[in-house]
Amino acid sequence: MSLQRPPRDLADHYDRLAPDYDRLHRRWLRHAGGEAQAALEAMVRALATSKSDLLDAGCGTGALARALIAEGMSAAGMTLLDPSDAMLARCVDIPAAKVKGRLESLPFDDETFDIVTCAWALETVPDPNVALMELCRVVRRGGVLCLAFCADMPVSGLADRLMRRALLWRGTGQLLSREHVIHAISSLGEFEVRSVPSRGPAATLLARRMAEIGVASISS
Ligand SMILES: C[S@@+](CC[C@H](N)C(=O)[O-])C[C@H]1O[C@@H](n2cnc3c(N)ncnc32)[C@H](O)[C@@H]1O
């Protein structure tokens, strides 16, 4: 799935990065991942209801949860998961459940959440395939998995190229193959996967778990 050597375990790295994370991540969004992030947020806004149970896996400093709450989504049904204590500490103002944990072994029962989001975290784990299977496992039937990740997409501008190189040079993640991610989810036979076009070395995917196996619920 990855086009590069898998990274080392990055939880410690993000512990150290936490104080500067928002500033650095804003740069990434400005020059490379902004469209993919906007697409992810728009999907979640369109799909969430006041009763949705939402997991943000690899939540970082909680920026996505904060944005959704600011727009009226209830924090009551939200769960924020990250392995980094320092990142979770930065979510202290968010009145949602916080869980220390890893994508590769999510501490939740099967089919627990209506919406599972994972933004810029899938590519930070050593085995994204295992993480992806875990993310799919905890999505309820009829629910969705919303992903944004660094992807090996064709890049056009200088900024794109520099951000791509910086990611690989810093070793803070890897560029995943969007097609491989789509294939891995689709091969479960229970999800309908859509890719949302965006510029930059990034991809956004919406994967809906069919209400019944073999019955797709996203009209095309
Ligand atoms: C690039 S940040 C993304 C944070 C946030 N989702 C955002 O959009 O700003 C990657 C996050 O993944 C977390 N992470 C690293 N390894 C992880 C793992 N094995 N399981 C879950 N999260 C992990 C890091 O601690 C960090 O918070």
Image: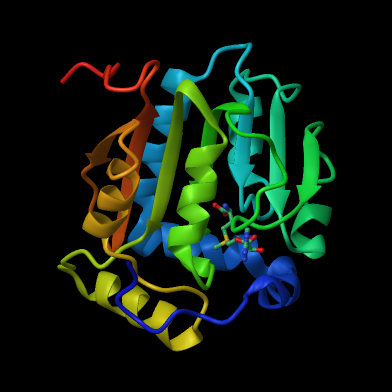
User: Is residue 120 toward the left or the right of residue 74 in the image?
Assistant: left
For ligand 1, which image quadrant applies? bottom right
Q: Residue at x 20, y 16 (%)?
A: 219
Name the foreground residue: 123 vs 214. Answer: 214
Residue 202 horizontal/vertical position (percent): 32, 58
* 83 versus 162 height, above or below: above
The quadrant the N terminus occupies is bottom left
* 144 versus 125 height, above or below: above
Residue 4 horizontal/vertical position (percent): 34, 81
Can residue 35 be seen in the rendering of this structure? no
Q: Residue furthest top?
A: 50
* 34 versus 3 height, above or below: above
Residue 210 horizontal/vertical position (percent): 36, 22
Name the foreground residue: 83 vs 138. Answer: 138
Can residue 4 be seen in the rendering of this structure? yes
Q: Residue at x 40, y 16 (%)?
A: 211
Q: Residue at x 28, y 45 (%)?
A: 187
Count up the numbered dots: 0
Q: Residue at x 37, y 28 (%)?
A: 208
Task: Name which quarter of the figure residue 89 lies in.
Answer: bottom right
Residue 36 horizontal/vertical position (percent): 35, 48
The quadrant the C terminus occupies is top left
